[in-house]
Structures are given as structure tokens and as C-alpha cells.
Amino acid sequence: MTPSTEKIFITGATGFLGSWIISRLIDRGIQVVATDISDDHRRLELLKPDLPRDLIDFRICDVRDAETLNTQIAETRPTGIIHLAALQIPQCRANPALGAAINIGGHINIFEAAGKHGIDRIIYTSSIAAKPRGKANAPSNFYGVFKKTDEEIARIYWEDHKLPSLGLRPYVVFGVGRDDGETSAITRAIEAAALGKSYEIPFTTRSCFQYAADVADVFVRAAVSSWDGALLSDVTDTVHSTDDVVAAIKEVVPQAAVSCADILRVSPSDGFDTSALKEIIGDFQERPLVEGIRETVNLYCEIAERHCLSDV
């Protein structure tokens, strides 16, 4: 593999999506500065049991700590930033002040540091939760409000400082390591099927269900691209129902004992736009739902076998 001249600074590196993105960056020989408030990289180790340590610089960093963030960026001199660090819906609901400090304050610190050190590629996670919905025609929780605010902050940094950014709005992302947040129920259902257990998804909905590898590949391709403006994009416009998810799980694992509760979870199911993303990375392919589920089932079975062998 030819070494890449790119080096990507990632926040929220121990999280589910961060682990998948790091895995895909490593596959391309791209150096990673992996930062988080935790040094627990169990999710990444599930995906990469034999980590190439020469490609990863693990560091502790809280995005609320602007001084440490600036120091680490100055020391590592990355070519781009993927900013993922955030509290999810349940944590923002339980502690809105902390959620705002991390999801908004941390977001501002990233943009300030990028501008100070001349980094002209910021890819950050917004969310479908930022889209308006329901009677209020607005985000329905603190998390969505914070993410919508982040989108506006990115716009102002372009207008005032010409700092390019790309906000990506993944929605229900599934795959090994997704163990946090309300919509982790989709992954839990797939894991249960793989391991021969029963599981009820605690809601029914129509939404975008995306395989983690596909989403991670989009982030990686954007991180090595260039563009002008504060762009914002959905990551897919493909919509399925939770009944479709259950049917796909049973196609992969015919004996699966998975189902959906009869509780409606209101989600945006139309109006998705991926044109800004395609402007940056060109056309991109996503696996059919059943194939993403198949790969997830296979990986859970491989991990279970790996654990059995280690216990012998």
C-alpha cells in the first residue's frame, strides 16, 4: 500500500461512527489522529483486531477544551478534520446544558482551531434530527436543535472567514459497534438475529437506514476532497420502513425472532437531498439494505467465533 500524504484529525474517535471511519481510513493508508475523552477503543478493535499502530496517533482531547485542541492540532498538523464528538438524543435530553457545551461549544472550538491553523477541510456530523418535523415544523428534541445550530454556525464561518465545511446528515446508521442512542435498536435487532436471540424494535417508522461502512466511506472520500462554501447534505435518499428491516433480517437469518413494537416514531421520510455531497465526491454507491444486514450478521458471527477461540 502506498502511504498517503493525508492526515485526518478525528474527534469522537471511540464512538461507533468514528471507529468505522478510522477503519476505512486505515484501509486506504491514511494517517489518523484519533481523539476523544476516552481511550476505550473496543469498537475499533472489533472491526480491526490487528490495528496498524503506525497509522494511528491516539490522543485524549475534550472538544470543550480549546487550548488542548489547538495544541494537538498544532502538533499533528492534519490536512483535514472530521468532527464527530457529540452527545446523542438521550444524553442531550437528560442534560441539555452539557449537550450544548459539547455539541455547540465544541463545534465552535473546532472551527476556531481550523481557522487558526489553516485547515480548509472540516467534515462534521449534523443529523436528520435537525430537519423540521411534526406540528411545530421544527427539530423535535434538544439534539436536533443543537445540530441545526451547528449548521448555521458553519454557514457563518464561511460567510465571515471563508472556512469551507461539509455537514453530513446520516440518520439511522447500523453496524457492529452501534450500541448507543435510540435508533441503535436496529443494530440490536441484527445482532440478536446473528446470535440466535429474540428482539423487538421498540418503535415502527419509515426512515433512511444506512450501513456503517457506506457512511464511513462517504466521510473518507470527502476528507480527501476540496470545495468552497459551507455545504450541507443528506447521505442518502433511500427510504425503508422498519417492516422492511425486519424482512431483510429474516431473509439473511430465516429463523430470526425479531419484530417491531406498534409505537410510531415520527421521522422525516422525504425531502432528502444529496446533491451537495455528490458535488464534492461524485456519485457514490450504497449497498442494498439486505446486503448491509448480511455483512453485519457475518461480522457479528465472526466476532463471536473470535471470542470463543480466545476463551479456549
Image: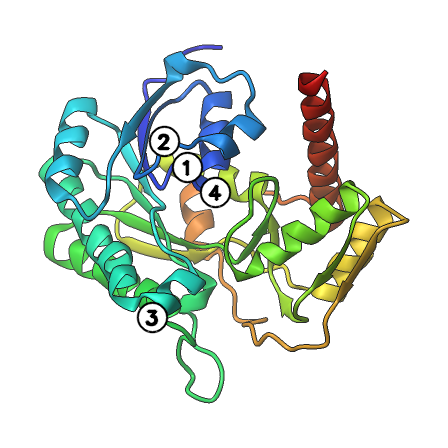
The CA span between labels 4 and 2 is: 16 Å
**Residue matched to label 2:** 39
The CA span between labels 2 and 3 is: 29 Å
Residue drawn where x is 26% and y is 52% of the image? 229
Q: Nearer the viewer, mark 2 or mark 3?
A: 2
Residue 302 sits above or below residue 134 on the image: above
The CA span between labels 4 and 3 is: 21 Å
Q: Residues within 10 Å of mark 1 (few under 14, many from 20)?
A: many
Q: Is disc 1 in contact with disc 2, using a CB cutoff of under 8 Å?
A: yes
**Residue matched to label 1:** 14
- Amino acid type, label 1: Thr
Residue 27, numbered circle: none
**Residue matched to label 4:** 17
Q: Is residue 267 visible?
A: yes
Q: Residues within 10 Å of mark 2 (few under 14, many from 20)?
A: some
> Which is nearer the N-term, disc 4 or disc 3?
4
> Which is nearer the N-term, disc 3 or disc 1?
1
SS at mark 3 in the image? helix
The CA span between labels 4 and 1 is: 8 Å
Residue 146 sits above or below residue 109 on the image: below
Q: Is disc 3 in contact with disc 1, using a CB cutoff of under 8 Å?
A: no
- Amino acid type, label 2: Asp
Q: Is residue 24 visible?
A: no
**Residue matched to label 3:** 145
Q: Is disc 4 in contact with disc 1, using a CB cutoff of under 8 Å?
A: no
> Which is nearer the N-term, disc 4 or disc 2?
4
> Which is nearer the N-term, disc 2 or disc 3?
2
Q: Nearer the viewer, mark 3 or mark 1?
A: 1
The CA span between labels 3 and 1 is: 24 Å
